[in-house]
Amino acid sequence: MKFNPFVFSWSFLLWAFLGIIGGITAGLYWIILEFLTDKIAFFEGWQVIPVMSISGLLAGLIIHFIGDPGEIQLIVNNIRFNKGKLNPKNNPSMVLSSFLCIASGGSLGPEAPLVQVTGSIGTWLGKLFRLKGEALRSLSIAGMASGFTALFGAPLGGSLFALEILHYKHAVEYYRAIIPALVASSFSYIIFALIVHLGLGPAWNLSAYEYSGIFDFGYAVFFAIIATAVGWSFIYCVKFFKLLFEKRPIPIYIKTLIGGLLLGVIAYYLPITRYFGHHEINEIISDHFPLKLLFIILIFKIIAIAITVTSGWRGGFIIPLFFVGTTLGLIIHQFIPSVSLTLTIVSCMAAINACVTRTPMSTTILLTTLTGFGHLIPILFASLTGYFLAPKIPFISSQKHQN
Protein backbone atom coordinates (compact mmCIF):
# COMPACT_ATOMS: atom_id res chain seq x y z
CA MET A 1 0.00 0.00 0.00
CA LYS A 2 3.03 2.28 0.25
CA PHE A 3 2.67 3.46 -3.35
CA ASN A 4 -1.13 3.30 -3.43
CA PRO A 5 -2.38 6.54 -5.11
CA PHE A 6 -5.91 6.12 -3.69
CA VAL A 7 -7.56 6.76 -0.34
CA PHE A 8 -7.99 2.99 -0.15
CA SER A 9 -5.69 1.44 2.51
CA TRP A 10 -5.24 -1.69 4.63
CA SER A 11 -7.68 -0.15 7.11
CA PHE A 12 -10.45 -0.66 4.56
CA LEU A 13 -9.74 -4.39 4.53
CA LEU A 14 -9.92 -4.48 8.33
CA TRP A 15 -13.26 -2.62 8.36
CA ALA A 16 -14.61 -4.90 5.62
CA PHE A 17 -13.46 -8.01 7.49
CA LEU A 18 -15.17 -6.73 10.63
CA GLY A 19 -18.37 -6.19 8.63
CA ILE A 20 -18.22 -9.73 7.23
CA ILE A 21 -17.78 -11.20 10.72
CA GLY A 22 -20.57 -8.94 12.01
CA GLY A 23 -22.91 -10.07 9.22
CA ILE A 24 -22.17 -13.75 9.85
CA THR A 25 -22.64 -13.30 13.61
CA ALA A 26 -25.93 -11.46 13.12
CA GLY A 27 -27.12 -14.07 10.61
CA LEU A 28 -26.40 -16.98 12.94
CA TYR A 29 -27.99 -15.13 15.86
CA TRP A 30 -31.15 -14.45 13.82
CA ILE A 31 -31.44 -18.06 12.58
CA ILE A 32 -31.16 -19.46 16.11
CA LEU A 33 -33.57 -16.82 17.45
CA GLU A 34 -36.17 -17.66 14.77
CA PHE A 35 -35.79 -21.38 15.49
CA LEU A 36 -36.30 -20.91 19.24
CA THR A 37 -39.20 -18.51 18.68
CA ASP A 38 -40.99 -21.01 16.46
CA LYS A 39 -40.53 -23.78 19.03
CA ILE A 40 -41.71 -21.71 22.00
CA ALA A 41 -44.62 -20.24 20.00
CA PHE A 42 -46.15 -23.75 20.14
CA PHE A 43 -47.36 -22.82 23.63
CA GLU A 44 -50.45 -20.59 23.42
CA GLY A 45 -53.33 -19.40 25.60
CA TRP A 46 -52.81 -19.85 29.33
CA GLN A 47 -49.58 -21.73 28.63
CA VAL A 48 -47.76 -18.49 27.83
CA ILE A 49 -47.84 -17.57 31.54
CA PRO A 50 -45.74 -20.52 32.83
CA VAL A 51 -43.58 -20.50 29.67
CA MET A 52 -42.61 -16.84 30.05
CA SER A 53 -42.16 -17.23 33.81
CA ILE A 54 -39.80 -20.19 33.35
CA SER A 55 -37.95 -18.38 30.54
CA GLY A 56 -37.48 -15.39 32.83
CA LEU A 57 -36.19 -17.61 35.63
CA LEU A 58 -33.72 -19.38 33.32
CA ALA A 59 -32.49 -16.07 31.87
CA GLY A 60 -31.98 -14.75 35.39
CA LEU A 61 -30.05 -17.85 36.40
CA ILE A 62 -27.79 -17.45 33.35
CA ILE A 63 -27.07 -13.84 34.31
CA HIS A 64 -26.54 -14.82 37.96
CA PHE A 65 -24.08 -17.64 37.30
CA ILE A 66 -22.34 -16.59 34.06
CA GLY A 67 -22.23 -12.84 34.68
CA ASP A 68 -24.28 -9.70 34.19
CA PRO A 69 -23.80 -8.49 30.59
CA GLY A 70 -25.18 -5.06 31.46
CA GLU A 71 -27.50 -2.94 29.34
CA ILE A 72 -27.16 -0.20 26.71
CA GLN A 73 -25.88 2.21 29.40
CA LEU A 74 -22.81 0.00 29.92
CA ILE A 75 -22.06 -0.10 26.19
CA VAL A 76 -22.26 3.70 25.95
CA ASN A 77 -20.07 4.20 29.02
CA ASN A 78 -17.42 1.75 27.77
CA ILE A 79 -17.19 3.49 24.40
CA ARG A 80 -17.00 6.95 25.97
CA PHE A 81 -14.95 6.39 29.11
CA ASN A 82 -13.20 3.01 28.75
CA LYS A 83 -11.15 3.91 25.67
CA GLY A 84 -13.76 2.33 23.42
CA LYS A 85 -13.29 -1.19 24.79
CA LEU A 86 -16.26 -3.58 24.87
CA ASN A 87 -15.44 -6.71 26.84
CA PRO A 88 -16.28 -9.94 24.95
CA LYS A 89 -16.41 -11.93 28.20
CA ASN A 90 -20.00 -10.69 28.67
CA ASN A 91 -21.15 -12.10 25.32
CA PRO A 92 -22.15 -15.64 26.40
CA SER A 93 -24.42 -14.31 29.13
CA MET A 94 -25.94 -11.67 26.83
CA VAL A 95 -26.53 -14.08 23.95
CA LEU A 96 -28.03 -16.91 26.00
CA SER A 97 -30.23 -14.70 28.18
CA SER A 98 -31.44 -12.64 25.22
CA PHE A 99 -32.37 -15.80 23.29
CA LEU A 100 -34.68 -16.83 26.14
CA CYS A 101 -36.08 -13.35 26.72
CA ILE A 102 -36.80 -12.52 23.07
CA ALA A 103 -37.88 -15.98 21.84
CA SER A 104 -40.34 -16.47 24.70
CA GLY A 105 -42.12 -13.21 23.91
CA GLY A 106 -40.48 -10.39 25.84
CA SER A 107 -41.10 -6.85 24.60
CA LEU A 108 -37.47 -6.18 23.71
CA GLY A 109 -35.74 -6.87 20.39
CA PRO A 110 -32.39 -8.33 19.32
CA GLU A 111 -30.74 -5.03 18.40
CA ALA A 112 -29.03 -4.46 21.80
CA PRO A 113 -27.50 -7.97 22.05
CA LEU A 114 -26.26 -7.76 18.46
CA VAL A 115 -24.74 -4.31 19.04
CA GLN A 116 -22.88 -5.53 22.13
CA VAL A 117 -21.59 -8.73 20.52
CA THR A 118 -20.46 -7.17 17.22
CA GLY A 119 -19.04 -4.15 19.03
CA SER A 120 -16.92 -6.41 21.24
CA ILE A 121 -15.73 -8.23 18.10
CA GLY A 122 -14.52 -4.85 16.86
CA THR A 123 -12.63 -4.36 20.13
CA TRP A 124 -11.10 -7.83 19.83
CA LEU A 125 -9.93 -7.18 16.26
CA GLY A 126 -8.52 -3.82 17.30
CA LYS A 127 -6.47 -5.41 20.06
CA LEU A 128 -5.36 -8.18 17.68
CA PHE A 129 -3.94 -5.54 15.32
CA ARG A 130 -2.59 -3.51 18.26
CA LEU A 131 -4.77 -0.48 17.65
CA LYS A 132 -5.00 2.16 20.38
CA GLY A 133 -6.84 5.36 21.15
CA GLU A 134 -9.34 6.62 18.60
CA ALA A 135 -8.47 3.85 16.13
CA LEU A 136 -9.58 1.21 18.64
CA ARG A 137 -12.67 3.18 19.60
CA SER A 138 -13.60 3.63 15.94
CA LEU A 139 -13.34 -0.11 15.31
CA SER A 140 -15.60 -0.85 18.28
CA ILE A 141 -18.15 1.67 16.98
CA ALA A 142 -17.89 0.14 13.50
CA GLY A 143 -18.62 -3.25 15.03
CA MET A 144 -21.69 -1.83 16.79
CA ALA A 145 -22.87 -0.32 13.51
CA SER A 146 -22.44 -3.60 11.65
CA GLY A 147 -24.69 -5.43 14.11
CA PHE A 148 -27.34 -2.75 14.10
CA THR A 149 -27.28 -2.48 10.31
CA ALA A 150 -27.68 -6.23 9.81
CA LEU A 151 -30.98 -6.25 11.67
CA PHE A 152 -32.42 -3.05 10.20
CA GLY A 153 -31.01 -3.28 6.69
CA ALA A 154 -29.91 0.37 6.68
CA PRO A 155 -26.12 0.90 6.49
CA LEU A 156 -26.31 4.70 6.74
CA GLY A 157 -28.93 4.64 9.49
CA GLY A 158 -27.06 1.97 11.43
CA SER A 159 -23.79 3.90 11.20
CA LEU A 160 -25.37 7.15 12.38
CA PHE A 161 -27.16 5.35 15.19
CA ALA A 162 -23.90 3.93 16.52
CA LEU A 163 -22.56 7.49 16.77
CA GLU A 164 -25.72 9.24 17.99
CA ILE A 165 -26.54 6.77 20.76
CA LEU A 166 -23.16 7.47 22.39
CA HIS A 167 -23.82 11.11 23.13
CA TYR A 168 -26.85 12.79 21.67
CA LYS A 169 -25.35 16.31 21.87
CA HIS A 170 -21.84 15.56 20.72
CA ALA A 171 -22.00 12.77 18.15
CA VAL A 172 -19.43 14.79 16.18
CA GLU A 173 -16.86 13.77 18.81
CA TYR A 174 -16.78 10.38 17.11
CA TYR A 175 -16.60 11.64 13.51
CA ARG A 176 -13.50 9.55 12.83
CA ALA A 177 -15.63 6.43 13.23
CA ILE A 178 -18.14 7.28 10.49
CA ILE A 179 -16.19 5.87 7.53
CA PRO A 180 -15.18 2.65 9.35
CA ALA A 181 -18.82 2.29 10.45
CA LEU A 182 -20.13 2.80 6.91
CA VAL A 183 -17.72 0.25 5.41
CA ALA A 184 -18.38 -2.37 8.10
CA SER A 185 -22.14 -1.76 7.86
CA SER A 186 -22.18 -2.17 4.10
CA PHE A 187 -20.41 -5.52 4.22
CA SER A 188 -22.50 -6.68 7.18
CA TYR A 189 -25.68 -5.74 5.32
CA ILE A 190 -24.77 -7.86 2.29
CA ILE A 191 -23.66 -10.89 4.31
CA PHE A 192 -26.73 -10.83 6.55
CA ALA A 193 -29.05 -10.49 3.55
CA LEU A 194 -27.36 -13.46 1.86
CA ILE A 195 -27.76 -15.61 4.97
CA VAL A 196 -31.33 -14.84 6.06
CA HIS A 197 -32.77 -12.91 3.08
CA LEU A 198 -33.93 -10.05 5.29
CA GLY A 199 -33.22 -6.35 4.99
CA LEU A 200 -33.99 -6.05 1.28
CA GLY A 201 -36.90 -3.63 0.91
CA PRO A 202 -39.35 -2.22 3.48
CA ALA A 203 -40.08 -4.37 6.53
CA TRP A 204 -43.60 -3.08 7.17
CA ASN A 205 -46.58 -2.97 4.82
CA LEU A 206 -47.58 0.68 4.80
CA SER A 207 -49.47 2.08 1.84
CA ALA A 208 -47.65 4.47 -0.48
CA TYR A 209 -47.58 8.07 0.74
CA GLU A 210 -48.58 10.85 -1.64
CA TYR A 211 -47.54 14.38 -0.79
CA SER A 212 -50.64 16.55 -0.51
CA GLY A 213 -49.21 19.97 0.29
CA ILE A 214 -47.24 22.03 2.76
CA PHE A 215 -49.72 21.21 5.53
CA ASP A 216 -48.30 17.68 5.67
CA PHE A 217 -45.28 19.09 7.51
CA GLY A 218 -47.59 20.72 10.04
CA TYR A 219 -49.44 17.43 10.52
CA ALA A 220 -46.12 15.63 10.99
CA VAL A 221 -45.16 18.04 13.78
CA PHE A 222 -48.64 17.86 15.36
CA PHE A 223 -48.60 14.05 15.41
CA ALA A 224 -45.04 14.15 16.73
CA ILE A 225 -46.10 16.32 19.67
CA ILE A 226 -48.72 13.74 20.64
CA ALA A 227 -46.21 10.91 20.20
CA THR A 228 -43.65 12.76 22.33
CA ALA A 229 -46.21 12.98 25.14
CA VAL A 230 -46.58 9.20 24.88
CA GLY A 231 -42.77 8.96 24.95
CA TRP A 232 -42.76 10.90 28.23
CA SER A 233 -45.40 8.49 29.56
CA PHE A 234 -43.21 5.54 28.62
CA ILE A 235 -40.17 7.04 30.36
CA TYR A 236 -42.13 7.65 33.57
CA CYS A 237 -43.69 4.19 33.36
CA VAL A 238 -40.17 2.71 33.23
CA LYS A 239 -39.15 4.82 36.24
CA PHE A 240 -42.20 3.60 38.17
CA PHE A 241 -41.47 -0.08 37.57
CA LYS A 242 -37.77 0.48 38.23
CA LEU A 243 -38.66 1.81 41.69
CA LEU A 244 -40.86 -1.23 42.31
CA PHE A 245 -38.22 -3.75 41.25
CA GLU A 246 -35.46 -1.95 43.19
CA LYS A 247 -37.50 -1.30 46.32
CA ARG A 248 -35.99 -4.37 47.95
CA PRO A 249 -32.75 -6.09 46.93
CA ILE A 250 -33.71 -9.42 45.40
CA PRO A 251 -31.70 -11.85 43.23
CA ILE A 252 -31.78 -11.17 39.49
CA TYR A 253 -33.44 -14.53 38.77
CA ILE A 254 -36.35 -13.64 41.08
CA LYS A 255 -36.78 -10.31 39.28
CA THR A 256 -36.76 -11.96 35.87
CA LEU A 257 -39.19 -14.61 37.13
CA ILE A 258 -41.63 -11.94 38.35
CA GLY A 259 -41.17 -10.03 35.09
CA GLY A 260 -41.93 -13.18 33.08
CA LEU A 261 -45.06 -13.86 35.12
CA LEU A 262 -46.40 -10.32 34.56
CA LEU A 263 -45.53 -10.40 30.86
CA GLY A 264 -47.21 -13.77 30.49
CA VAL A 265 -50.44 -12.47 31.99
CA ILE A 266 -50.44 -9.47 29.63
CA ALA A 267 -49.68 -11.72 26.64
CA TYR A 268 -52.49 -14.09 27.63
CA TYR A 269 -55.11 -11.34 27.49
CA LEU A 270 -53.49 -9.36 24.64
CA PRO A 271 -51.48 -11.76 22.43
CA ILE A 272 -50.42 -8.99 20.04
CA THR A 273 -48.36 -7.37 22.82
CA ARG A 274 -46.18 -10.48 22.97
CA TYR A 275 -42.79 -10.34 21.20
CA PHE A 276 -40.84 -7.26 20.18
CA GLY A 277 -43.05 -6.13 17.30
CA HIS A 278 -41.17 -6.92 14.09
CA HIS A 279 -44.02 -9.04 12.70
CA GLU A 280 -46.73 -7.61 14.95
CA ILE A 281 -46.50 -4.16 13.32
CA ASN A 282 -47.81 -5.59 10.04
CA GLU A 283 -50.49 -7.50 11.97
CA ILE A 284 -51.84 -4.46 13.79
CA ILE A 285 -51.86 -2.41 10.57
CA SER A 286 -53.81 -5.00 8.59
CA ASP A 287 -56.25 -6.34 11.19
CA HIS A 288 -58.33 -3.14 11.70
CA PHE A 289 -58.66 -3.25 15.47
CA PRO A 290 -61.48 -1.14 17.03
CA LEU A 291 -60.52 2.14 18.70
CA LYS A 292 -61.09 0.95 22.28
CA LEU A 293 -58.90 -2.11 21.77
CA LEU A 294 -56.14 0.02 20.19
CA PHE A 295 -56.08 2.19 23.33
CA ILE A 296 -55.80 -0.93 25.50
CA ILE A 297 -53.01 -2.34 23.32
CA LEU A 298 -51.14 0.98 23.48
CA ILE A 299 -51.30 1.17 27.27
CA PHE A 300 -50.37 -2.44 27.95
CA LYS A 301 -47.60 -2.54 25.33
CA ILE A 302 -45.96 0.41 27.08
CA ILE A 303 -46.35 -1.42 30.40
CA ALA A 304 -44.96 -4.62 28.86
CA ILE A 305 -41.87 -2.84 27.53
CA ALA A 306 -41.34 -1.11 30.88
CA ILE A 307 -41.58 -4.41 32.77
CA THR A 308 -39.22 -6.10 30.31
CA VAL A 309 -36.65 -3.29 30.67
CA THR A 310 -36.77 -3.04 34.47
CA SER A 311 -37.10 -6.70 35.49
CA GLY A 312 -33.72 -7.72 34.09
CA TRP A 313 -34.85 -9.17 30.75
CA ARG A 314 -32.35 -8.54 27.97
CA GLY A 315 -32.89 -6.92 24.57
CA GLY A 316 -33.37 -3.58 22.82
CA PHE A 317 -36.39 -1.30 22.83
CA ILE A 318 -36.22 0.42 19.42
CA ILE A 319 -38.55 -1.87 17.44
CA PRO A 320 -40.97 -2.13 20.41
CA LEU A 321 -41.12 1.68 20.43
CA PHE A 322 -41.88 1.60 16.69
CA PHE A 323 -44.80 -0.73 17.52
CA VAL A 324 -46.06 1.78 20.09
CA GLY A 325 -45.77 4.55 17.47
CA THR A 326 -47.71 2.45 14.97
CA THR A 327 -50.53 1.81 17.47
CA LEU A 328 -50.70 5.51 18.36
CA GLY A 329 -50.79 6.43 14.65
CA LEU A 330 -53.74 4.08 14.09
CA ILE A 331 -55.57 5.70 17.02
CA ILE A 332 -54.97 9.23 15.74
CA HIS A 333 -56.03 8.25 12.24
CA GLN A 334 -59.45 7.24 13.52
CA PHE A 335 -59.94 10.82 14.74
CA ILE A 336 -58.39 12.46 11.65
CA PRO A 337 -59.06 10.01 8.78
CA SER A 338 -58.53 12.67 6.11
CA VAL A 339 -54.74 12.66 6.69
CA SER A 340 -52.57 9.90 5.20
CA LEU A 341 -52.38 6.90 7.54
CA THR A 342 -48.79 6.29 6.49
CA LEU A 343 -47.78 9.86 7.35
CA THR A 344 -49.52 9.59 10.72
CA ILE A 345 -47.89 6.28 11.67
CA VAL A 346 -44.38 7.21 10.51
CA SER A 347 -44.52 10.58 12.30
CA CYS A 348 -45.48 8.87 15.56
CA MET A 349 -42.80 6.21 15.12
CA ALA A 350 -40.12 8.84 14.52
CA ALA A 351 -41.07 11.13 17.38
CA ILE A 352 -41.39 8.52 20.11
CA ASN A 353 -38.06 6.89 19.22
CA ALA A 354 -36.22 10.21 18.95
CA CYS A 355 -37.73 11.29 22.29
CA VAL A 356 -36.50 8.19 24.11
CA THR A 357 -33.16 7.47 22.38
CA ARG A 358 -32.10 11.04 21.34
CA THR A 359 -31.21 9.84 17.82
CA PRO A 360 -33.10 12.09 15.35
CA MET A 361 -30.74 11.65 12.39
CA SER A 362 -30.52 7.86 12.44
CA THR A 363 -34.23 7.50 13.29
CA THR A 364 -35.08 9.46 10.14
CA ILE A 365 -32.86 7.31 7.93
CA LEU A 366 -33.96 4.04 9.53
CA LEU A 367 -37.67 4.74 9.09
CA THR A 368 -37.16 5.77 5.48
CA THR A 369 -35.67 2.32 4.87
CA LEU A 370 -37.97 0.23 7.05
CA THR A 371 -41.26 1.77 5.89
CA GLY A 372 -40.44 2.64 2.29
CA PHE A 373 -41.55 6.21 3.06
CA GLY A 374 -39.98 8.07 0.16
CA HIS A 375 -40.21 11.60 1.59
CA LEU A 376 -37.44 12.28 4.08
CA ILE A 377 -38.44 15.75 5.30
CA PRO A 378 -41.72 14.95 7.13
CA ILE A 379 -39.94 12.19 9.08
CA LEU A 380 -37.12 14.60 9.89
CA PHE A 381 -39.61 17.19 11.17
CA ALA A 382 -41.23 14.55 13.39
CA SER A 383 -37.87 13.24 14.65
CA LEU A 384 -36.62 16.71 15.53
CA THR A 385 -39.89 17.49 17.31
CA GLY A 386 -39.52 14.37 19.44
CA TYR A 387 -35.87 15.19 20.10
CA PHE A 388 -36.36 18.82 21.16
CA LEU A 389 -39.44 18.09 23.30
CA ALA A 390 -37.80 15.14 25.07
CA PRO A 391 -37.15 15.27 28.83
CA LYS A 392 -34.01 17.19 29.76
CA ILE A 393 -32.66 14.16 31.64
CA PRO A 394 -32.14 11.45 28.98
CA PHE A 395 -33.77 8.04 29.30
CA ILE A 396 -30.39 6.39 28.65
CA SER A 397 -28.63 7.81 31.69
CA SER A 398 -25.12 7.38 30.27
CA GLN A 399 -25.98 9.89 27.51
CA LYS A 400 -25.61 12.67 30.08
CA HIS A 401 -22.72 15.01 29.44
CA GLN A 402 -19.78 14.22 31.67
CA ASN A 403 -16.46 15.95 31.67
Image (cartoon, helix red, strand yellow):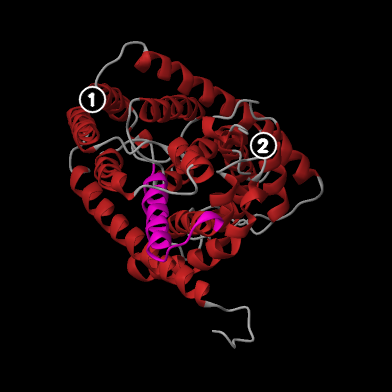
- Residue at image point 47% right, 24% down: 299
Residue linked to disc 2 = 387
Q: Quadrant of residue 313?
A: top left
Residue type, numbered disc 1: Leu
- Element carrying mark 1: helix
Residues at discs 2 and 1 in contact (Cβ within 8 Å): no
Question: Within the magenta stretch, is there residue 363?
Answer: no
Residue 374 locus on image (x, y percent): 65, 59
Could you say which disc has been placed on residue 257 in the image? 1
Q: Is residue 307 above or below residue 357?
A: above
- In-image side of 193 versus 220 (left or right): left
In this view, the residue in front, 399 or 128, is 128
Q: Is residue 28 above or below residue 84?
A: below
Residue 94 locus on image (x, y percent): 30, 43
Question: Within the magenta stretch, is there residue 131?
Answer: yes
What segment is highlighted magenta in the picture?
109-134
- In-image side of 311 versus 354 (left or right): left
In this view, the residue in front, 299 or 4, is 4
- Element carrying mark 2: helix
Instruction: Name the chief secondary structure element in magenta.
Output: helix
- In-image side of 246 versus 15 (left or right): left
* Res 170 visible: yes
Residue type, numbered disc 2: Tyr
* Res 197 visible: no
State the CA–CA distance, disc 2 to disc 1: 34 Å
Q: Earlier in the sequence, mark 2 or mark 1?
A: 1
